[in-house]
Amino acid sequence: MRLWLVLRLAAVLLLWSAEAAAQSPFAPKVSGPLSQRVVAYQIDANYDPSKHTVDATETLTYHNLTGQPLDTFPFHLYLNAFQPKSTWMHEAHRDVTFRSSSLAEWKPEDYGSNEVTSFQVLGLGDLTKQMKFISPDDGNPDDKTVLQVKLPRPVPPGQDVTFQIRFKATFPEVVARTGYKRTFLLAGQWFPKVGVWWNGKWNCHQFHALTEFFADFGTYDVRITLPKNYVIGATGVQVADRDNGNGTKTVAFHAEDVHDFAWTADPNFRIVEDQFEGGVGPVRIRLLSYDSHRREWQPYMFAAKEGMRRFDEWYGPYPYAQLTIVDPPHGAGEAGGMEYPTFITGDSGWFIPKGIHSVDGVVVHEFGHQYWYGMVATNEFENAWLDEGINSYSEIKVLDSMYGENTSAVNLLGAQLGDREYLRVSYVRSPDIDSLSRPSYTDMSLGSYGDTTYGKSAMMLLSLETIIGEPTLKNALHTYFLRYRFTHPTQEDFMGTVNGVSGRDLSGYWNQAVYGAQAFDYEVLRADSQPVKWWDQNLQEKKGETEYETQVILHRKGDFVFPVDALVKFDNGDNVREKWDGKERWVRYVYRKKAQVESVQIDPDYRIPLDLDYLNNSHATEPQHGAIHKVATVWMFFTQFMAQILSWLA
Amino acid sequence: MTHDRQSALSAGFRLLWRRQKLLWWVYVVNLLCGALGTVPAWLRLRAVLAHSLAGERLTNRFDLGMWFELTRLPEVSIMRYSTASLLLALVFLVFMLFVTGGVLETYREDRRLTTSEFFAASGAFFWPFVRLLLLSIIPFVIVGLTYHALIGFADSVGDRAAADQVGIFLRWGAMLVLLLLALALRLWLDIAQVRAVAQKERRMWRNLWQAWRMTWHEVGRLYGMYFLIALVAWITLAVGVAICAKLPPTATPAVLLVLELIMFAQVATRLWQLAGAMAWYQRHVEMVPADAVEFTTPHPQEIGEASSMNEPPPPSDPGPELPPADA
């Protein structure tokens, strides 16, 4: 038995290495290894499109770099989340919807599974019977998303252990970034994946509805057998494509210094290719899309190249040889907007007006994850803001530079929306619910998780610019990337880097913005002018001659302390810019001038998006009718139009 | 056929033009409903924005982010102030239900009715038209169910189809079918209203049936006319919105003007359809007088019953005293 296993493994390894040598997974000026390769996966998979199942054999070699003997190994079986009693399904059902899917009711097509049929360890024999499911987060006995195996003897530090696992993956109809739709398949989180030894213990959370993933870097050699007419794309680069002569083909992929492997297939895919000239050589961009989305091919490529160019310039090089972009078909929105190493999914439609930059936004965001998740591989279960938040901030910066700050999300029919405002909308929904530092999978709900992780984190970083300056923050992110790429940094690593680069102790800010959940709200409480000689009954007020005393009071309504600017304008054209540290609950400014106050505005340049309420940030002494009339005009039109539509029934 | 459609179309337009006072009047009521429906929202917007510079982001450009921030405030809740708009829209619906009789009578007579004549005609057909509206729920529900079934079919086929756009095309097709069916339904109901006014018909079931026969008989011409007028309304709306989008963000008076022109065109095209339907009906009655004869002749049984009583049967409802159709 053992000899058979060794011989088979040797044959497979020989084949893999020959295929892997066919094409480098890196850009021309890069050679590996780039990471501490803890894992080496070799997977031989057979896809059955009629059943949406994969039967596979996985050979995983784990290098024990933990510095201590290991006898227990946990594995993620993510597809088991798609079962009625799983923790994922319980959480998703609790919050009714997951992204675009309604999970209020159980539907059989939601069912998915990872079934391990055989578990062997080289040199230790068949351990299938030793497998047991554990639920380290919530103790749910029905959750089968973490499998644990105890070895008969530990793996010494510095030694390897090889697991050979046979499994069957059954995909649900597309949900939570994985599954099928018609002939389309996005295979994400589809194979047994070992946990991460991190901070002195195994980090292998159950699959939660709120958060994403965490895994070790390594190499992947994956062969997928599927019908000949299918077009396939995957993490890494394609190294072989063999016609099996029986209506199927086997396609092999190779990837290095990545921590996950996803693939997609559909006979209707059209391949569009382009190239990006990066700092370390050309990168091939391979878009898998559909004829019906032809209109979006150019925006996809444009956004990918523009995004890659800016990330390359601002943060560091993209070292891989290829980026695969998947454009999911109509109805497979749950597969859209997802990141895997060197492999991202976009989100387009049959017709998107030119002024809506949604394709660009998704592509830039998901490409950004190649940096903030792919290379800087933070723990998405526990500190999702480190990848989603930093990436949302980067996305804002990229889109602003592409389309302008006020129009980077929407510029259509006179309506405008900047990407920062788009993300701010989510922040103001849940500004003080969950702190960023709270383990993300324990956030209050899917809604608060999204609002906090994406919106609040991005607003937190934008507001930080007012303290340390935008160039310094950009430099800090650059440093953070270079320092922590191909590792698993913590939030303290990030904050320490920003502190170091800026040369400031920002703990006061981090304590509130990351560890706390204080509400941030400043307002102008008072702004008025009275004649100094108010008691003089003969006083005749004359502009430019009468002296006035102006009172301005700024109020910190929330508990978040933050330095703010306030612009005080007078009717003689004088402007005064005040700087308030915000430490007290309020501050009063008094001016004696031959002029009356016209307006006071806190954060007049809108540089502090953490402020919850922009409407109370200013006070104008004269009524401002412009917006009221404009909104009322449109409102009246809608009322008239609705009346006309209704009267059409009469 | 084209000639007939064009003549009903142009006759309807000429009628609309000659009786444009009606158009102005209906438009002004629509405007008033719009203005009154906006008052609660305007008052709350004033309370929030009157002394805030944040509104500049709505004035100098229409910043959707600021709009979201504004509407998330409980005091500027869209839902809350949509209620006032919806109520005023319902008021306009009732108003149109009331005046349709007078409008059609004016078009039938093609002269300026006195106020009392107009309101007499309006009042006389208010309840019959309410009944017609209630009856029309049945076909509208059928159309709605058809649309629902088509959408279900589209989704089901789309889910199984290899090409991903099949579902979208089918959905768009279902929407087009809904639009065309609704227009056909409106045409049928309009002919029923026209016929009711022309024939002083108060029995709406019977009227609907006769209107169906008449409409079906010349459905191509009538539908063509209605579709063309509806097309004018849709194009006006699209062009108007495009112009608004091109105007400078601070040009609120100009936006108001364009939006009101759009509304005027919407009201005008609707009345054009009614005028066109009346013009067609009058020509139809000239060519096929059976419709006129059939309902002015009492049923034999009714005559028999009346004879046995040796006195004419009392009218169930005298209705307004209006001139004959060919006056």
Image (tube, helix red, strand yellow):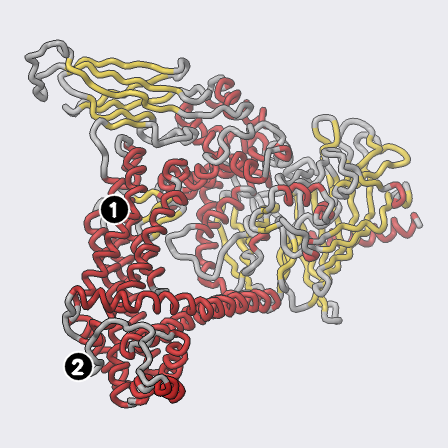
Q: Is residue A442 above or below residue A516?
A: below
> How busy is the neighbourhood of tag 1: few (under 14 within 10 Å), some, or many (20 plus)?
some
Q: Residue at x 48, y 41 (%)?
A: A311
Q: Which mark is residue B327?
A: 2
Amino acid at dot 2:
Ala
Looking at this view, is A239 or A185 the one in front? A185
Looking at this view, is A523 or B225 the one in front? B225
In the picture provided, is A256 more to the left or to the right than B251?
Answer: right
Looking at this view, is B217 or A463 the one in front? B217
Q: Position of residue A99 (x, y in %)?
A: 57, 47
Q: Nearer the viewer, mark 2 or mark 1?
A: 2
Q: Position of residue A67 (x, y in %)?
A: 77, 27
**Residue under label 1:** B249
Say whether disc 2 or disc 1 marks the residue closer to the N-terminus. 1
Q: Is residue A107 above or below residue A370?
A: below
Q: Residue at x 35, y 75 (%)?
A: B192
Q: Position of residue B217 (x, y in %)?
A: 37, 86
Judging from the image, mark 1 belongs to the subunit labelled B
Amino acid at dot 1:
Pro
> How busy is the neighbourhood of tag 2: few (under 14 within 10 Å), some, or many (20 plus)?
few
Judging from the image, mark 2 belongs to the subunit labelled B
Label 1 sits on a secondary structure element that is: loop
Location of the C terminus of chain B (image quadrant): bottom left
Q: CA distance from mark 2 to mark 1?
A: 54 Å
* Residue A471 visible, this angle: no
Location of the N terminus of chain B (image quadrant): bottom left
Q: Residue at x 55, y 32 (%)?
A: A482
* Residue A562 visible, this angle: yes
Labels 2 and 1 within one chain: yes
In the picture provided, is A124 more to the left or to the right than A377?
Answer: right
Label 2 sits on a secondary structure element that is: loop
